[in-house]
Amino acid sequence: MSQDTPIQRFSERLGHRFSDEGLLRQALTHASASNNKSNDNQRLEFLGDRVLGLVISQALFEADRSAREGQLAPRFNALVRKEACAEVAGEIGLGEALMLGRSEMRSGGRRKLALLGDAMEAVIAAVYLDAGFEVAQSLILRLWGERIRTAEARAADPKSALQEWAQARGLPTPTYAEISRSGPDHQPVFVVEARLKNGFSARGQAASKKAAQVQAAAALLAQVKDTA
C-alpha cells in the first residue's frame, strides 16, 4: 500500500497494519465503485456483523454477571445497530477512505449512515481474516470501549425517556436544535441542544445529528432526574 493515501491514513487511524492489504481495500469498496460484485464489501459486511455480535455479546455478558437475557438484549442491540457502527466509523474517519461510485460521491455517500455502518462491519471482518479473532476482538473492544461501559444507558433510549419525564410533569415534548456543524464533509461533528419548556437544556456532540440528539437527551435526563 503506497504511503500517504486515504487508505494508508485510515489504516493508521484504525491501528492495524494489514498483512493482506487487499482485504482492507475490499472492505472500503462500496458496490457502486466495483464492476465485480465479489470485490465490493458486502460479503465482508456479512462476516463482520457476526464477529462484532460475538465480541459485544461476550463483553456485555462479562461486564454484568447479574444481568438477565431481557436486560442484555437491548444493550446488545444498542451497540451493534447500524447507527452505532456509523458513529464509530465517523470517529476514525472511515468516510475519507471509502471508495464510491460517481453517483454515491455526488449524493454525499461518505456521510451516509448506512454506508459508513456497513463499511465499519466490513473493516472488522477484514481485520478478523487478516489477523484472527483475538486481534479483531481487541480492535472492537478498543473502538467500542466507552459504549460498552455505558450500554445500559444507551439501551434505555434517552429521547423516549426524556419525553416520558416531560409528559409526566405536564410539559410539552422536548425540542432539539442544531447548534453547530463543524469538521470536513467526511467527518462532521454535530452539536445539538435538547430543551425543555421549564428552561432546562443540555448539549450533545456526535458524528451524526441523530446521535448528537441522543447524547443531548441523555445529558438532560441526568440533569433533571432528581428534579420534582
Image (tube, rainbow, N blue to C red):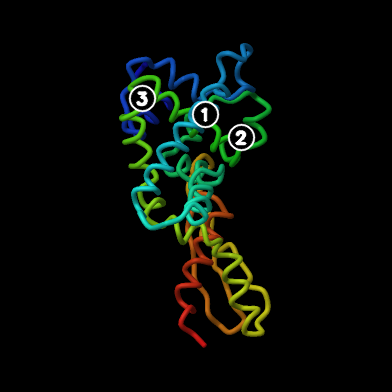
The label shown at residue 4 is 3
- Spatial CA span between label 1 and label 3: 15 Å
Q: Position of residue 132 (x, y in %)?
A: 34, 23
Assess whether mark 1 and mark 2 are in contact (beta carbons under 8 angstroms): yes
Residue 172 as seen in the image, left or right of residue 209: right
Q: Position of residue 106 (x, y in %)?
A: 66, 32
| Tally of marks | 3
* Residue where numbered disc 1 is placed: 98
Assess disc 3: are there few (<14), some (14-19) or many (≥20) residues with their C-alpha within 10 Å of its C-alpha: few
What residue sits 41% from the left and 51% below the top?
147
Position of 87 relative to 52 (above/below) = below
Kind of residue at disc 1 = Leu
Of helix, strand and loop, which one carries label 2?
A: helix
Asked if residue 182 can be seen in this view, the reply is no
- For this rendering, which residue is in front, 102 or 10? 10
Q: Position of residue 11 (x, y in %)?
A: 36, 28
The label shown at residue 82 is none
The label shown at residue 109 is 2
Q: Position of residue 5 (x, y in %)?
A: 40, 23
